[in-house]
Amino acid sequence: MAKVNTIRLMAEKKDELLQQWIELHLASLSLRKDIIGNENLYRQSRDFIDAFVQAAEGADFEDINRVEWTTVRKILAEISTNRSRQGYSPSETASYVFTLKEAIIRLLQKEYGVQPDVLIQETLTISKILDKLGLLTFETYSKAREEVIYRQQQEMLELSTPVIQLWDGILALPLIGTLDSGRTQVVMENLLRGILSTNSDVAILDISGVPTVDTLVAQHIIKTVSAARLMGAECIISGIRPEIAQTIVQLGVDLSMVKTRATLAGALKLALDMRKLTIVQIGKA
Amino acid sequence: MKLTVKSDSLVVKSPQEIILARQKVREYARSLGFNLVDQTKLITATSELARNMVEYGGGGIVVIEHIDDQGQKGLRVTFEDQGPGIADLEMAMLDGFTTGNGLGHGLPGAKRLVNEFEIDSKIGLGTRVSIVRWA
């Protein structure tokens, strides 16, 4: 039984293997040694060898998806996910398993150096399974990365559309970035919810931070204004820069049914007028 | 005689790629010394035409060229798709006409934002729009 030899050796020479593995692994990590505590790495790796030996004793080497390998897969997935979040590179993460392979092969070489047949057989068997596990770390790593990207996208969507109460009954939404259909949907939902929860009847949409105002953006603005109007709130669009004003006119988009102002300050003044409020100077500044 | 000094081409098939095309045009317009109003007009026209291409033509290629006509510097942007083509070009160039859900100002609006505008469309073969704005 080829596989038994390696596994027996791994259990017998666990400390030596662990030492060798961690040395090799740390050497492959370049500048990242600081992130994971050596002690933690030691503990993790010992758990991994224990789980590996235990799984290998009872299990099939061909299929790492079998139930016997569950613990091994779990430990690896945890390591890959953590490393992905901590900013390790993909190769640094994959090297975890690949340096174990190197350490095992060195151990085998020492033990079976005089029996090339056995050495080759053992090396082939152990390489096969460890390569599969290496690919698994890679897959888990990229999955964790994708989750990070997705979460950031969602966060950005939320971040970029705050609803601010400027005064009693007056809301402001500073819009920053490209106003595509997805963003408009979020803006509209936040706005309508804000109108309801703060009982506001004036909302200022500031587009100073929207780089391009084309017909689609204009259409989105018109729709948002109409929806707010249905709820009894009037919208003011502010932050219309001179170049945007000229472009909108030449494009032929009619925004005459929407109240607009060049600046947020102008919009606030209009909003206060609409609510029959005024700001009074009470002394010399 | 218009000479191409420098050019770039981009595949535009999704709304995200429209943004990339806009950014590329902005980069060219800046390097040619366009003022802010001219930059904005050209970028907005690009946005309209690229979106038409994505929405009606199934996406295509945007070519951005820095051109030179006897010392006169300009920017030419060409949009080429292999979509179904436009059935009635005269109608398509009318304000307020749309076969989709838009406002119907895309094509005529883009034409007003630039100095030169050429459109060529063949049913079943695709559409090619080329715009030029001189610096």
Image (tube, rainbow, N blue to C red):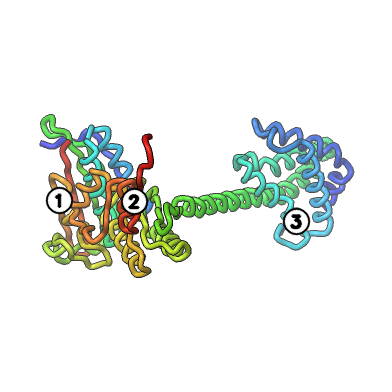
Q: Is residue A5 above or below residue A17?
A: below
Q: Are marks 1 and 2 in contact (CB under 8 Å)?
A: no
Same-chain status of marks 3 and 2: yes
Position in image of residue A148 (x %, y %)? 56, 50
Q: Are marks 3 and 1 in contact (CB under 8 Å)?
A: no
Q: Which quadrant of the view contains residue B6? A: top left
Q: Are marks 3 and 2 in contact (CB under 8 Å)?
A: no
Q: Dot 2, how many residues are within 10 Å of its Cα: few (below 14), some (14-19), or many (20+)?
A: few
**What amino acid type should be assigned to the residue bearing mark 1?**
Arg
Which residue has dot 1 on it?
A: B112
Q: Dot 3, how many residues are within 10 Å of its Cα: few (below 14), some (14-19), or many (20+)?
A: some
Q: Which mark is residue A278?
A: 2
Same-chain status of marks 1 and 2: no
Position in image of residue B83 (x %, y %)? 26, 61
Name which residue lies at 17% across and 42% down.
Answer: B133
**What amino acid type should be assigned to the residue bearing mark 2?**
Thr
Q: Which mark is residue A61?
A: 3
Q: What is the chain identity of the residue bearing mark 2?
A: A
Q: Nearer the viewer, residue A97 or B87?
A: B87
Q: Is residue B21 above or below residue B67?
A: below
Q: Which mark is residue A65?
A: none
Position in image of residue A272 (x %, y %)? 34, 54
Q: CA distance from mark 3 to mark 1?
A: 70 Å
Q: Secondary structure at mark 3?
A: loop
Q: Which quadrant of the view contains residue A106? A: top right
